[in-house]
């Protein structure tokens, strides 16, 4: 059996391939239970604290609903309403929160905030998005691919756009799960070289492949999954105009996806800007699975919470 109780979930890099597969299969199982109206409440009487320093629709709602469905309760803690927003150190926050709560999630800017909260907490901490990574989204995404394609190993996942948190988590997941990951980003917007190095290290153990490219047409060749994300992530809004210029040849549109496999899946973590990183025809077209991914946030995170809390 795979025991994950008490672990943090800060990034995909911290989990072994068999642990990730276990969580993905558990997510699919919990989804089936929920659809059948079967109660599954292993977290009865437990409470999750949710610290948010940035906006959220999917993450907040799916964690809150997920915790409720597992029999527990969630508390939304906006940075501006807790003393952390007035400068109380993260480590004191972690120590105090651990005396009340059974688990915490945090959405923040610098990834070191996530690490610091986890270090100072005696209860499991989940990364609900940092500037470095968005592992819960990648888990929901690979659950979706597994459901749609019946397998992950050997599939080609192509990410077009900003070398951001989403790229990092998708690349890490692909490298752990034996997939072929290829990305294309404009100059100056490449992924973090340390993340790439780490992913390639994992890939050498699993038979995965990691190609970091410049040309979207080269990257997308034969793709099973085509993924993109906004050009200006949260915290980078003031760079919107210059990024629009830098990314103008990186739109995922009807012409570009012609080189993907016929039955490719279009994916996007959302929120999306139609007409910028993706054309309306692609994101609202027959290959798009964006709402299945969004739904799977609920199931994937329930699996993570049920396993570690
Ligand atoms: N994809 C995602 O994390 O969405 P939210 O920002 O709405 O939580
Ligand atoms: N890269 C985006 C993802 C949002 C879910 C951001 O960080 O804003």
Image: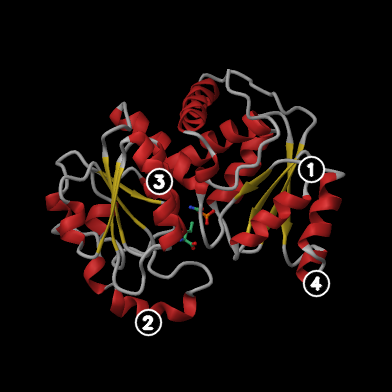
In terms of depth relative to the viewer, which is nearer, 291 or 178?
A: 178
- Tell me residue 284's x, y (percent): 28, 51
Is label 2 or label 3 in front?
3
Q: Secondary structure at mark 1?
A: loop
Horizontal side, residue 115 vs residue 89: left or right = left
Is label 4 or label 3 in front?
3
In terms of depth relative to the viewer, which is nearer, 283 or 79?
A: 79
**In which quarter of the view is residue 108 placed?**
bottom right
Numbered circles on residues, count: 4
Residue bearing mark 2: 241
How far apart, in angstroms, are the residues tagged by discs 4 and 2?
A: 32 Å
How far apart, in angstroms, are the residues tagged by discs 3 and 1?
A: 30 Å
- Tell me residue 193's x, y (percent): 41, 62
Q: Secondary structure at mark 2?
A: helix
Closer to the N terminus: mark 3 or mark 1? 1
Q: Residue at x 63, y 39 (%)?
A: 65
Residue 63 visible in the snapshot: yes
Horizontal side, residue 152 vs residue 281: left or right = right
In terms of depth relative to the viewer, which is nearer, 155 or 200?
A: 200
């Amino acid at each position: 059996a795979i025991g994950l109780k008490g672990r943090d979930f800060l990034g995909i890099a911290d989990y072994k391939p068999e642990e990730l597969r276990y969580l993905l299969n558990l997510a699919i199982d919990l989804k089936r239970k929920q659809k059948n109206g079967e109660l599954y409440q292993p977290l009865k009487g437990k409470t999750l604290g949710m610290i948010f320093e940035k906006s959220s629709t999917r993450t907040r709602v799916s964690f809150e609903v997920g915790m409720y469905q597992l029999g527990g309760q969630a508390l939304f803690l906006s940075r501006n309403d807790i003393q952390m927003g007035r400068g109380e150190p993260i480590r004191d926050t972690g120590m105090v929160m651990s005396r009340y709560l059974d688990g915490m999630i945090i959405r923040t800017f610098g990834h070191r905030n996530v690490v610091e909260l986890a270090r100072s907490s005696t209860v499991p901490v989940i990364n609900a998005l940092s500037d470095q990574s968005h592992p819960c989204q990648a888990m929901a995404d690979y659950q979706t691919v597994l459901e749609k394609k019946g397998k992950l190993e050997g599939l080609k996942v192509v990410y077009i756009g900003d070398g951001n948190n989403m790229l990092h988590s998708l690349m890490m997941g692909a490298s752990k799960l034996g997939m072929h990951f290829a990305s294309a980003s404009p100059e100056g917007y490449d992924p973090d070289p340390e993340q790439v190095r780490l992913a390639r290290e994992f890939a050498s153990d699993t038979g995965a492949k990691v190609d970091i490219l410049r040309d979207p047409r080269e990257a997308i060749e034969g793709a099973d999954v085509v993924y993109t994300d906004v050009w200006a992530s949260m915290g980078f809004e003031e760079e919107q105009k210059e990024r629009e210029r830098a990314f103008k040849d990186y739109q995922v549109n009807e012409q570009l996806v012609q080189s993907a496999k016929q039955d490719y899946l279009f994916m996007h973590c959302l929120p999306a800007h139609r007409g910028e990183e993706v054309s309306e025809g692609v994101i609202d077209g027959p290959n798009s699975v964006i709402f299945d991914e969004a739904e799977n946030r609920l199931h994937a995170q329930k699996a993570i919470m049920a396993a570690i809390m």
